[in-house]
Structure formats: structure tokens, C-alpha cells
Image (cartoon, rainbow, N blue to C red):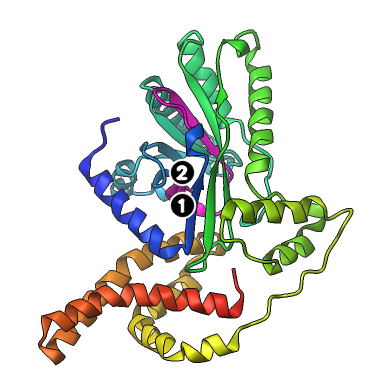
Amino acid sequence: MRVNAFYWLLRGYVKIALLFFYRRWQISGKENIPKNAAVIFVANHQNAFQDALVVTCGIADAPWFLTRANVFGSAFARWLFNQFHMMPVYRFRDGMKGLRNNEASMRLSADILNKRWAILLFGEGDQNMQWALRSMQKGFARIAWMVQQENNWKLPLYIVPVGLHYDHYYNFRSRMLVNYGKAIPIDESYSTLDERKFLLEITDTVRAALKPLMLDIPVENYQPIEQAVKNQRVKRNMVEQLALDQQLADNWNTNPVTVKPKSKKYLLLALTFPLHVYTWVNNFIPYFIIHRFLDKKVSREFRGSVKFGMGMVLAPVFYLIQGGVVQAIVHDWRITLAYLITVPFLSVWSVDIWKKATASR
């Protein structure tokens, strides 16, 4: 796929920022992504734009993805998001005119797939910050039907389910897993079905394939299971962590458990207290600006995405400004360079130690 240089530069920077933002950003199952074929990635949707970033920045492909239409409000926004490979998708709340505009996005999606490129959709339609899989929308199945009807079922087309599992949806230095499942071929075996049966069968098949790739807590016991998951021990490997969390949720009806919060390591906090003070002083201004803006302007479901976006801009800017202050004081470029190199890594290390000492995920 031909992609503009701006996209690659931005994606490279976002990828570096993700490695700083997450304590562990783990990708599993990339071997399940077909080569030289059209691919529809279908993921669960829990964390606004962050879901798209962790998927698209973690693979070699540069997939296009469908995004809620209300962020495309201006000509500049439409141009900018188009550079990021984002296409608008309209919902019932956007009115009938908006829904008619979906035909253009579906047409563009079909054209992308006809070139054996990839698109990313979120099967649930909108997001919900819960460890649960909701009912699936049929948009991805309609696109698959359209493309194969145009190609007489000869296009090598696959749907790849993608499970996303976050320890926390917006905390800095939390952990997350991108879990690619087995590719589902959309081939001539479906050609005898009418459109309605095809949509139902594909939607049900993909939903069933997504469930093992993520944490799906039953609605009736959601709160006690959620709390138990938050309290249970931390596995370094996120695939193992997901399996442990799934086991707790799956066995709840027959074996409800009380998981006590992990004990805090106050000695570790005391020994590393100077480090925390140092990093707090060096990060106070961007931290204050970001959290002030989040508390006043941003709804909870966008908190993680906005926090990440503001952080990847403000933190480097203020580090450079503070580096200039250091240089003005010490007049030694070597000390200034050492400051600029060590501050981001010490900041990350400080938060990691804090999480370990306070037993938080």
C-alpha cells in the first residue's frame, strides 16, 4: 500500500509514545494476519481512539479505520483525519442524512479491500469502558458482502477478530493486550446464502471468535467480578493475565471468590521517595495542564485518548523548555543533554515503581 510520508512519520512517533505510555503494550497472534489478501480487522471497542492506535501501530500494514462521524466537523479535521486513514461512520443519532453518507464510507472501504489492503472496524459500533462484549453491528459483514458480490466471491478476503484487553483505560503506565485471532475466510462457501442469512451468520461467527480473545464479564455479576479482577495477582505476560482474568469470570457462578487487595510496599516507596519528588517537579506543569483540561472538558470515555494525545505533545515541549532553563543555569551542554535523556526514562521508572509499591494494575 502506498502511504504518504506524513502518515509514516506520525505513526512512528505515536508508536514511540505508546511504548512510553504503556508499561506493557503486548501484541499476540500477528501470525494470524493473512498476507497478500484483503483483510477486515474487527475489534471490540472499549477505549475511543486509543483502540485504533494500539491496533494500527502494532502491525506492518497501514489499515484504514471507521470513526464516529462527529469528529469530522471541519474541512481541516476531514483533511487531517484522512491523513490518518480515518473514515467517518454515522449512527442513528446523526439522522437519516448522516446514515445516507455511510454509503460513501462503505464504497471507500470496498475500494480499499478490492486493492487487497486492510480496514479496521469496531464490531460493537460504539465504545463502552467495561470488560464485556456487547451485541455486534452488521457493518463489517455488509462490507464483506458488497466486496464479494462485486468479485463473484473470488477475492481472497478474510475477517480477523481482534480482542483488546486493558488493565486500565486511561492510567499512565497501565498495560494492554492486542490479541489477533484466527482469520475467518469469506469465500465461495457463503455464496449460496442470501444477504440476510450471510449477515447473521458472519456477525455471529465473528462475535464467537472475539469472545476468547478478550475479557467478557457477565452483566449479572459484573461489579463483584470486576473488583476481583482488579485485585488479583499480576502476571507479566498479558496473554497469561487475560487467561487468569477469564478463568475467574468463567468460574464465578460455581466458585465466587473474594480477592483481597494486594499489600502495599511502603518501604519501597520510602527508599525511592527522592526519585518521585524529582520526577514530580519535572512533570508538574504538563501534568497539571492535562488533568485540568480532562476534568473540565473531557467525558470519561475519551479520557484515555485525550490524555495520551496531550501527553505526547506537551511532555516533550516542556522537557525542551526545562532543558533550556538547565542550560541557562549550568552552561554545560553535556549536563543539559543528560537531563533531556534521563528525565523521560526516570519519569517512567518512577511511575512503574509507584505502581509496584501500591500494587495497582
- Work out whether residue 145 or residue 105 is closer to the camera in this orientation and state it: 145
Which quadrant is the N terminus positioned in? top left
Is 274 situated left or right of 163 in this image? left
Q: Give the range drawn in magenta.
A: 33-54
Q: Earlier in the sequence, mark 2 or mark 1?
A: 1
Whether residue 97 appears in this view of the structure is no
Total labels: the figure holds: 2
Whether tag 2 and tag 1 are in contact, CB under 8 A, the answer is yes
Question: 10 Å neighbourhood of mark 2: few (<14), some, or many (≥20)?
Answer: many
Expressed as whole percent of the image width and height from the top left, the position of residue 166 reads 57, 57
Spot occupied by residue 322 in the image (x, y as percentages of width and height): 23, 82
Which residue is painted at 40% across and 78% down in the image?
A: 287
Q: Is mark 1 on a helix, strand or loop?
A: helix
- Residue 254: image x %, image y %? 89, 53
Residue shown at 79% from the left, 64% from the top: 224
Which image quadrant is residue 135 in?
Answer: top right
User: Callout 1 environment at 10 Å: few (<14), some (14 to 19), or many (20+)?
Assistant: some
What's the residue at 24%, 76% (across, down)?
A: 340
- Inspect the image, locate mark 1, and give the three-letter code of the amino acid beneath it: Phe
Pick whichever, 293 or 360, lies toward us: 360
- Left or right, residue 331 beside residue 358: left
Q: Which SS class for mark 2?
A: strand
Instruction: Check disc 2 and give the amino acid type.
Output: Thr
